Amino acid sequence: MKFEEELAKVFLSEGAIIISLWALFSSDLGIFGIIDIFLLLAFGALIPFTMFFDYLVLPFFTSIFGIVEIPAEGYEITKKQDAIIKYINGVYYAIGYLGASIYEYVLRREEPEENLEGRFIQGLELWERAIGSIKFPIKFSIISFQRDLVAARRELEEQRDYWEYRLSKEMQATMPNAMEIDNIQRKIRILDVKLNRMSAGEKPLGVLMYASVYACGLSKEAALKNLESAIKEATVTLGNALDLKITRLSGRDLRNAFLFEYVIPPSEKELDAFL
Amino acid sequence: MQKRDILFYSVLVLSILCSLLVLGFILYLPTIVKFILILLSGIFAFFAYFSFKFDYIVLTFLTQKNKRIKTGGQRYWFSPTGDVLVTKIGNTFYASVFLRIHSYSSYTEKTDEEKVEFVRLWEKAIGSSEQPVSFSSLIAYINRESYISAINDKLLRAQHAYEEAKQQGAKEEELERLRGEVAMWKNILDHIKAVPSRNQLSIVVVTQKGDNEEAAIANVKTVASNLAVNLSAILGVEVTQLNQHEIETCIEPEKIMPSSEVLIK
């Protein structure tokens, strides 16, 4: 779903709320009017909240209405939208997904990669140790895709131009803020490092990381309970070993991860559409 | 216009209609009706966005009118050759090929130079494909059902032989030997059952689409064979294409953790 398209729908919905408020202020409803104001403002706030925190909103609704989604024959998504259940041969299997993202270390990004070899060695050793210590089935996946070089370069250059403009404006101010100037210069240096790497022939690569965790039990509750403990252990082990930020996937992200187990969107554009 | 857009605009129009009704008949409508109409317009405004965002749930919920809503059918099927997984999303067919990288050396055994080289090769391999590719490391339980069953048979046979010898009044030495055999098989079985054996697989998945099943399969086969050659050349290891049974072992939970392994305890 495109961000711009989604944003347009948010504005249209907020527009409808404004019309409702106009109708409300035109009528004299007394105490009912006060109730309506609060409710309309709550709905107005819920719309952008749903846009950014869909992983909280959807499970809330499916739990309230007791909706169980069946994404494919033989599978069901729990009411909390955070696990997939499969029942086969008298055993319940639960699948949970974890999203992994790299921590954005500003100081590390600012400088060209130093001691890269040492980090490589340490990273993979930790990875092997993590894999060895996990006692339950797990699948760690990386979807890599080449980004359009021209578009990626243009995007970085545009960002650089913007920060250059901000820097010159800040410098010309009557009372320049030293901290702000330092912050902008740091951002420009980060962009320079990225642009230099691209100029040196490095291809811009997009990466999507996630892990699938499996558990089972003789009842649905037992399978989900086992999955919870497996997920907790995987979060700690993978997070520490690979220096990654691990988050549990739910809602649309869970459905995508379930699909990405066997279908990888064949182009960057399609991958964007899925996400 | 997509279904979700139609749903969004329909609900939004309802919201605006409720407000316009209040504005148009402001002097004629009782307070309680105006209160309800304004409240409804707010609910519809929120629901318009909600139905756009979660169209796959809302649309199926509205059409199926059931709390167990079915948003997908058959998950996938296999090509007649059994080595390509096929699925249909909307009107497009997607075909996926699973490749296995046979790398058996442990990273910790390598020297520092070899480790750096190993990482560089992997980095090159990951960036080698023009299409999005998934690299997975799967830790699955090995299905030892037939092995455990064979050991169990031997234990039962030994127990039967011991009981028979006991009834026939065999010598104490013979009984002692048979008791020992029973204990041995029992110990072996307990040891095997204690911890499931695990297997680590490195899998690469690539997908292509097509207007029909055959086109998607042909496209993915071309891309997969090129990718297999590239990966094999870069990493210097054997890369093989998985068959139906092996693909299921990578994606189906009951194959990743066979019940014989998880319930024997």
Image (cartoon, rainbow, N blue to C red):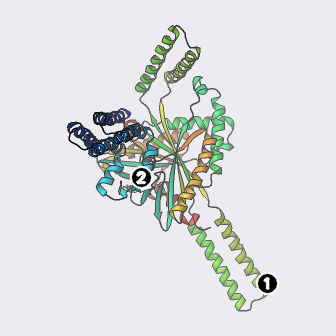
Residue type, label 2: Thr
Chain of the residue that carries numbered disc 1 in the rendered image: B
Query: Looking at the figure, which quarter contains the C terminus of chain B?
Result: bottom right
Q: In the rendered view, tell whether residue A122 sits above or below residue A229.
A: above
Q: Residue at x 28, y 41 (%)?
A: B15
Of residues A82 and A20, which is closer to you in this image?
Answer: A20
- Helix, strand or loop at label 1? It is helix
Q: Position of residue A56 (x, y in %)?
A: 46, 45
- Say the numbered circle drawn on residue A244: none
Whether residue A45 is visible, yes or no, is yes
Of residues A91 and B206, which is closer to you in this image?
Answer: A91
Seen as rendered, the residue at the extreme bottom is: B168
**Contact? badges 2 and 1 (CB < 8 Å):** no
Between marks 2 and 1 in the image, the one whose residue lies nearer the viewer: 2
Q: Position of residue A111 (x, y in %)?
A: 60, 23
**Position of residue B152 in the picture relative to residue A82 (left or right):** right
Q: Residue at x 58, y 23 (%)?
A: A110
Q: Which residue is labeled 2 in the image?
A: A62
Q: Position of residue B136 (x, y in %)?
A: 52, 46
Q: In the rendered view, tell whether residue B151 sits above or below residue A35.
A: below
Q: Which residue is labeled 1 in the image?
A: B173
Q: Residues within 10 Å of mark 1 (few under 14, many from 20)?
A: few
Whether residue A255 is visible, yes or no, is no
**Position of residue B148 in the picture relative to residue B62 (left or right):** right
Residue type, label 1: Glu
Of residues B101 and A196, which is closer to you in this image?
Answer: A196
